Image (cartoon, grey):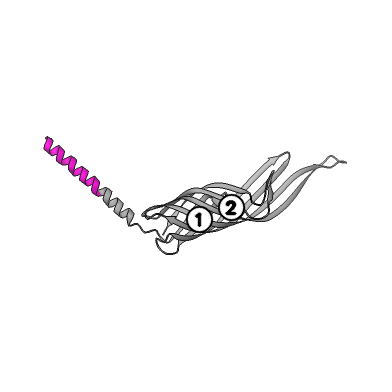
Amino acid sequence: MNAKKSKGLALALLLMGICLTMTARTADSTFVMPQHSIYGEVGGPCWGVSANWDARLKKDSPWGYQVGLGWAGRWDNSAGIHTHTMYYGLTTGVNYLIGKRKSRLELELGNHLRLISSKLAYASYLDVTGDISVQTKNKTQARDFLYMNIGYRHVSSHGFLFRCGLTPMVNITNGWTDSNDSYSKGAVFFAPYVSFGKAF
């Protein structure tokens, strides 16, 4: 292949690359964010796993709202005391997306209502017979949290949804005891999150 043909081929490849890049950017810049999405999340306000539904006020609106149901569990066994704690949560929030393309900054303010169900089991010795008696105590508490999501949201052209970020949250109700840990009113927590789902 001579020099002229090589230069011509290189120029054609360069122009093709520029055209493809411009086409991709144009397609991305004209992307319209779908109105609805469903996704599963690990972490975030519920601390465990959750199923969520999110909607824009209209297609490509920066404003939207979210509803989710979550579950988490904690088990602890120390000094002969076994504690089994389950968390069930309802999350509602209002979010705002910053950006005009498929990848956007996501800010959300919301409320997380959590039901805390604890079961405490411990062994006690009977003085007369020396037998072991297992005692159990059940306790259910409801607590309320305010939270904020600060994260990244990406929606592909085919509707694949990916989210990740950090959730600061604060307990606005009475404190509670979980296993060997005690939490007070005003306690602040930080939880990372990652989500996968479908936008449509």
Q: Nearer the viewer, residue 159 or 23?
A: 23
Q: Quadrant of the N terminus?
A: top left
What kind of residue is marked 2?
A: Trp
Horizontal and vertical percent position of residue 22: 27, 50
Q: Do labels 1 and 2 touch, CB within 8 Å?
A: no
Q: Position of residue 17 (x, y in %)?
A: 24, 45
Label 1, label 2: how far apart the Cα atoms are: 20 Å
Mark 1 or mark 2, which is nearer to you?
1
Q: Residue at x 67, y 49 (%)?
A: 184
Q: Residue furthest bottom?
A: 58
Identify the amino acid type marked 1: Glu
Dot 2 falls on a residue whose secondary structure is strand
- Using residue 31 as the reference point, say whether residue 181 is left or right of it: right
Question: Where does the magenta region start and end?
Answer: 1-19
| Residue 43 in sight in this render | no
- Disc marking residue 108: 1
Residue occupying the point 77% across, 47% down: 135
Q: Quadrant of the C terminus?
A: bottom left
- Whether residue 18 is in magenta: the answer is yes
| Residue 71: mark in rendering | 2
Residue at 40%, 62% in the rendered image: 59
Does label 1 or label 2 sit earlier along the sequence?
A: 2
- Find numbered disc 1 in the image and state the secondary structure of the residue it sits on: strand
Check if residue 2 falls in the magenta segment: yes
Q: Residue 40: tell me if it is visible.
A: yes
Secondary structure character of the magenta stretch overall: helix
The answer to whether 110 appears left or right of 103 in the picture is right
